[in-house]
Structure formats: structure tokens, C-alpha cells
């Protein structure tokens, strides 16, 4: 059996293979509500044979949205459609996961196909953003409001409330989004966190919010369900004093001791930086973080069956998270199994299209 198609059990949940649908923003919600676009988008990847289908970043609060069209889980009315989607995913042999997120200073943006720039707080679809410190992400952005203690407490409470709703919606995996320059990443990176209180300064202080969010989530998340955290393993700005892979390994040791099951290892997004793009360019970071003895997911320009299988076979990561490739080809897992000489179960409705010979 190809390593890519070997099952893996994490806590009480067994995944049929190592292929994960990585969170991908769809910018197709009104007031945070999922609709039939999300049902078809996420459901087709379950039909296509992935083991774990993770939603786009689901905002834990209205102000935590990247854009006004982001998926949300900040009110009970969001649960119904999400439950319909998770039921469909589970009916087709995959596991449904939710990525919970707060965009921090990278919130209040327009849609990518409209240019994607930040919308001013006094304009339609805009609002005031928050961050660990009043430091803007990009030139021309409004300065975010520095979170005070009450604001931090609200963020923690919002993550906890979102987790309760995720349980009711039927999700079996939660991933906390602490990467790509969003709020939790903004706190642990010294490039965006200039605080002098217990949430800033030292490494231990800068990771405090992430730890407190994890603890709050664990109070209401079923003990048998996996908890993932996505991090940016480097800011790609070592020379400027940014977050480094060594910091990520130190964090991984702490997260493992805190009960986190897997680190989805991405990079960048907190400051403008030159990133050396190439096939599998982030896999080395998953391999490095895995030295902490915690399971990892590899991401970043993974597009071929042999490439993905080698990542698992060589022990560089435990799961492969795929994004754009699964946008191009929702049925990549079925095709990959054929290319690797492995028989998998196809949906009966599609069996006549099975690869032969």
C-alpha cells in the first residue's frame, strides 16, 4: 500500500488516508452563513476521496473576518447549514474539520477579485481592526486598535463559543488558525507584537494568547477529537528579528505538552517578505517541527501523487494538506491512488468511471 493511502488514527478518529483538503477562503458568505456553494465545494472533495475536509477559515466574530464575505461561526444561526455540510462529508467517508480564525489587523478587506485591499472603517463593508499592537500590516492600511485586557478576554471567549458551535455543527476536527499573519500569529511574532505587558516581549509572553485559546477550546472540545494548530514556521524575516523555525520547534514542544495533536506547518504572511517558491517549498518546515515529537501536516505546492507519497514515506510529515491542486481537481485522491497502483473505494455513482488497467 502506498504510504499516502495508509490510514492514520488520531485520538478516536480514523482517517482513511493522509490527504487533507487544506482550508481555502471562498469569499462567498453573507453575514457568515454557509450556503449551497460551501456544500458543493466541500462535499465534492469528500466524494473525491480526501480523508479530511477542512473548511475555509471560519471567523469566530464579525470583526475577526478577513472580508465581509467570510464564513462565520459567531452566532447559533450559523450551525444549521454547517451541520448539513458535515453530515454530507461524513456520509461519504471523509472527516469534517473546521478552521477557527480571527484575522486581527488583516481583517476588513475587500474580495480578492475586487482587488483585496483593506476597506476603511468608515466605508461600507469596513470596520475597525484589532491587533496586539497598533502596527499596520501594509502601507495605507488603517492602524489597528491595540487589544486591551477586556479585548483579549473577548477573543478567548469567542474561540470557546465558536468551538461549542463547531461541536453542535458536527465537526470532528478543529484547527486553530495561528498562521499567515492573522491574530494569533500577530501575537507570537515579534514583528507585530510590540507590547510590554504579559502578552508581549519574551517568547513565553508572546505565545501566551495561543496557549490560553487552546486551554479554553479544550474545556469544551470532546477529548477524543483531534485538535490541530496551523502555524507559520517562519516569518521569512530572520534578519529583521522575525519568528524563526527554531521558535516553531520550541513552540511545538509546548503545544505537544498542551495536548495539541498535529501542527499544520505553513509559513509567512505576517510581513511582506520574499519567499522562495518551489515545489514542496514548505515541507522542510514540517519535517523540522516534527523533531519535537508531534505529528505534522505538510503544505505548499504539493501537486503530484509521487511527491505526496514520498513526503509520508520519508517521515517528513504525517499528513499532506493540499489546496490549489484540489481546487483544480477535487478527485485528485482517486487519480493518485490509480497512479500509485492502489485500489480505493469509489462512490457507487461514479464507479463506472473508475480507472481501468
Image (cartoon, rainbow, N blue to C red):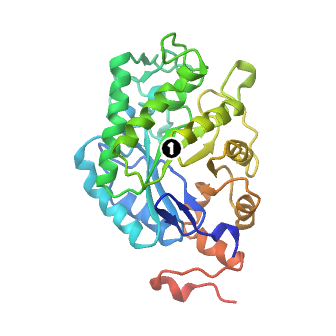
Quarter that holds the C terminus: bottom right
**Relative vertical location of residue 177 with respect to residue 133 in this rendering, above or below:** below
Give the quarter of the image for residue 161: top left
In the displayed structure image, the side of residue 228 where residue 169 appears, left or right: left
The structure residue drawn at horizontal position 43% and vertical position 73%, both measured from the top left corner, is 92
Quarter that holds the N terminus: bottom right
Give percent across and percent down for residue 66.
44, 36
Give percent across and percent down for residue 345.
54, 81
Q: Residue at label 1?
A: 259
Give percent across and percent down for residue 299.
64, 50
Residue at the extreme left = 77
Give percent across and percent down for residue 154.
33, 27
The structure residue drawn at horizontal position 49% and vertical position 18%, both measured from the top left corner, is 199
- Other residues around mark 1 within 10 Å, as few (<14) / some (14–19) / many (≥20): some
In the displayed structure image, the side of residue 1 where residue 263 appears, left or right: left
Q: How many marks?
A: 1
The residue lying toward the viewer, choosing from 157 and 300, is 157
The residue lying toward the viewer, choosing from 340 and 209, is 209
Instruction: Determine whether the residue tagged by mark 1 lies in a helix, strand or loop.
Output: loop
**Relative vertical location of residue 21 with respect to residue 116 in this rendering, above or below:** below
Residue at the extreme top = 196
In the displayed structure image, the side of residue 142 where residue 293 appears, left or right: right
Query: Can I make out residue 121 in this image?
Result: no
The residue lying toward the viewer, choosing from 212 and 72, is 212
Query: Can I make out residue 7 in this image?
Result: yes
In the displayed structure image, the side of residue 77 where residue 6 appears, left or right: right
Amino acid at each position: 500500500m502506498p504510504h499516502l493511502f495508509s490510514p492514520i488514527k488520531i485520538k478516536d478518529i480514523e482517517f482513511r488516508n493522509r490527504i487533507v483538503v487544506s482550508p481555502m477562503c471562498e469569499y462567498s458568505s453573507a453575514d457568515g452563513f454557509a450556503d449551497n456553494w460551501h456544500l458543493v465545494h466541500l462535499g465534492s472533495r469528500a466524494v473525491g476521496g480526501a480523508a479530511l475536509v477542512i473548511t475555509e477559515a471560519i471567523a469566530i466574530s464579525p470583526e475577526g473576518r478577513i472580508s465581509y464575505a467570510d464564513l462565520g461561526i459567531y452566532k447559533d444561526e450559523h450551525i444549521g447549514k454547517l451541520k448539513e455540510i458535515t453530515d454530507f462529508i461524513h456520509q461519504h467517508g471523509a472527516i469534517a474539520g473546521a478552521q477557527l480564525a480571527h484575522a486581527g489587523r488583516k481583517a476588513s478587506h475587500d474580495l480578492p477579485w475586487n482587488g483585496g485591499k483593506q476597506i476603511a472603517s468608515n466605508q461600507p463593508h469596513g470596520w475597525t481592526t484589532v491587533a496586539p499592537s497598533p502596527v499596520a500590516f501594509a502601507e495605507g492600511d488603517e492602524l489597528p486598535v491595540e487589544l486591551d485586557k477586556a479585548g483579549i478576554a473577548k477573543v478567548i471567549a469567542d474561540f470557546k463559543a465558536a468551538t461549542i458551535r463547531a461541536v453542535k455543527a458536527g465537526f470532528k476536527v478543529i484547527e486553530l488558525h495561528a498562521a499567515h499573519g492573522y491574530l494569533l500569529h500577530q501575537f507570537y511574532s515579534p514583528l507585530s507584537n510590540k507590547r510590554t505587558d504579559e502578552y508581549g516581549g519574551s517568547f513565553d509572553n508572546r505565545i501566551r494568547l495561543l496557549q490560553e485559546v487552546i486551554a479554553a477550546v479544550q474545556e469544551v472540545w470532546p477529548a477524543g477529537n483531534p485538535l490541530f494548530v496551523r502555524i507559520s514556521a517562519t516569518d521569512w524575516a530572520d534578519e529583521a528579528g522575525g519568528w524563526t523555525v527554531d521558535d516553531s520547534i520550541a513552540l511545538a514542544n509546548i503545544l505537544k505538552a498542551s495536548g495539541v495533536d498535529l501542527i499544520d506547518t505553513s509559513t509567512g504572511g505576517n510581513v511582506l517578505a520574499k519567499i522562495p517558491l518551489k515545489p514542496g517549498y514548505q515541507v522542510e518546515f514540517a519535517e523540522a517541527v516534527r523533531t519535537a515529537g508531534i505529528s505534522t501536516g505538510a503544505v505548499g505546492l504539493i501537486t503530484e501523487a509521487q511527491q505526496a507519497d514520498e513526503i509520508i514515506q520519508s517521515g517528513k510529515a504525517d499528513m499532506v494538506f493540499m489546496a490549489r491542486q484540489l481546487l483544480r481537481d477535487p478527485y485528485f485522491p482517486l487519480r493518485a491512488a490509480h497512479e500509485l497502483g492502489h485500489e480505493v473505494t469509489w462512490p457507487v455513482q461514479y464507479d463506472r468511471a473508475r480507472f481501468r488497467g
